[in-house]
Image (cartoon, grey):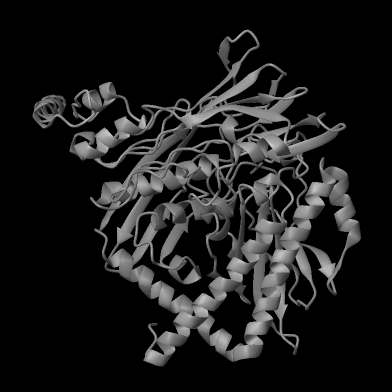
Amino acid sequence: MNPSTPGETAQLAVLSHRFEAIVTRMQNTLARSGRSGVLNTARDFSCCILTADGDVLMTGQSPPIHVMGGPDLQARSLLEFYPELHAGEAFLHNSPYHGNTHAADHSILIPVVDEAGVHRFTVLAKAHQADCGNSIPTTYMASARDVYEEGALIFPVVKVQEGYRDCEDILRMCEMRIRVPEQWRGDYLAILGSARIGERALLQLAEEVGWDTLDDFAGKWLDYSEVRMASAIGKLPAGTATTTTCHDPFPGVPEGVPITVTLSVDPDGGRIEVDLRDNIDCVPAGLNLSEATSRTAALIGIFNSIDHTVPHNQGSFRRVRVHLRDNCVVGIPRHPASCSTATTNLSNRVGNAVQRAMAEIGPGIGMAEVGSGMSPSEAVVSGVDRREGATAFVNQIFTGTNGGAGSPHADGWLTMSDLGSGGTLLLDSVEIDELKQPIVIHRRGIATDTEGAGELRGAPGIDVEYGPVGGPLEAIYANDGSINTMAGAREGHPGAPSVQAKRHRDGSVAEVDICGPVVIEEGERIIARTSGGGGYGSPVRRDPGAVAADVREGWVTRARAEAVYGVVLDDALQVDLAATRRRRDELDSKELVQA
């Protein structure tokens, strides 16, 4: 329902900002205290507040794959295993079979309990781990045939604090299986501290305004968000669309993984349905989605296609129904199917197919496809650092990101990374990466002519080249988009494929497998080109001035500008209007003949 009086409206606005400020404090705590580079450099973490019943209330600026369709499942697993919750408890949860995203995302859930012992809210802090105990030194083990080969430590809502004191036996077990135990312990304390900051802030807010006021706010905020979502859907055209895509061939799935998405928009009822059931069973690889990431991937594609001011919480989620099937590769996994890469590869494919289906339903909505895959530019690197002694290291680096998709309103976001991160992850500093790990980043720059051409173009890919210092380096990654590129929407062109290769000591270059590990000896280099994002709308409708600007920036060549966009430039790289009109007339004629 909408607030009925100006006073209620003001209170809703003030308290929503107070809750958002609490989530921001939690996130700042994690950013400043995390030990691994994946946290304090790339910021691959999220925080949220849930109601006592497990509804997502406030999420902040977090990677969407973390906070849309999963925290409620995690919180309800907590209630299932621990019906009675007490102040001072904390729970470690990373099980993809009980509502988490994937095993590498360690989550701490803390119940916020009032002075009378009543459970009022739950705070959740989630942080990606560079090493989660896998059988090889990586956070993503895409080639794992099942969870046993994957080897990750799985914690299905395990109590790690009672009376505000650590359960040391659990932490010792973790440290014995983690290759960098001090780094993991520091990250654990950062996640725990973040959640405790949220608990303390909610207790202080309740002391200020009262628990009844906070409970009343939670109900009204979710109802308000549902009304906003219904209104946004009501402005969309009615229709149903089915889109398909396919993950590249991969270990365990030599033919690749085809994906089918059927989406229906009912503007009169204010509802959207996404059906993912018409897909294959779980596969013998780490590509399977968890229930959380299956739901969330669909939600991301929808929220990318509607009014961006609609709050992301359980109220707005009520207006979307995602149909999933048990034991489906993009559904509800059946143990022991591995979900090691559930936040990236196939979740990107699902979300991309959803937003492209939205684009097919009507003009002015939806998006093309965002670049996909975990390129070697985002590999987990490991080895022995011999610069000062001989210490083991494991860390994920973010040296180059995939290109964002063209949309009805803007060109693709250059540092989008992928659909699941939604541009929230930061690109690593070259200098910091070289200080943290024994590597040298020899090259990083825009890959020319890799954008998906369109009226609003996709972002180009990025070229990265790096190698080890003082000894060998192992890079483990799980790429996609080398064969099946990122599609455009509404006549937009696909982005350029990703590339993974090795430069040998003699300077020769040879392609390497789409899935690591790859050992890079001293004197060798790994080469990565990330995926370009798809374009939206016909390239010949693109503003010639924008094409000229891309050429001057070095993102697009003059030859491509003329051949694909129909824009002719003079020697000063300014638009030749007469020649451009003639060239676009030629391209339009060719398209009519082909049609």
Q: Is residue 203 left or right of residue 213?
A: right
Residue 342 x/y as whole percent = 59, 45
What residue sits 84% from the left and 35% below the top? 391
| Residue farthest to the front, as pictured | 572
Of 251 and 345, the residue lying toward us:
345
Q: 45 or 215, which lies in front?
A: 45
> Is residue 138 at least partly visible in the picture?
no
Give x and y (percent) for residue 29. 68, 63
Q: Quadrant of residue 502?
A: top right
Badge count: 0
Q: Quadrant of the N terminus?
A: bottom left
Q: Give the residue drawn at x 24%, y 28%.
A: 573
In the depicted structure, whether residue 467 falls above or below residue 226: above
Can residue 556 be seen in this snapshot? yes
Q: Quarter holding the C terminus?
A: top left
Q: Position of residue 139 (x, y in %)?
A: 69, 41
Asked if 462 appears above or below 61 in the picture, the reply is above
Q: Can you say whether 69 is above or below 115 in the image? A: above
Q: Is residue 317 left or right of residue 455?
A: right
Question: x%, y% of residue 180?
Answer: 81, 42
User: Considering only vertical position in the picture, is 27 above or below 461?
Assistant: below
Compared across the picture, whether 345 is left or right of 566 comes to: right
Q: Residue at x 9, y 28 (%)?
A: 585
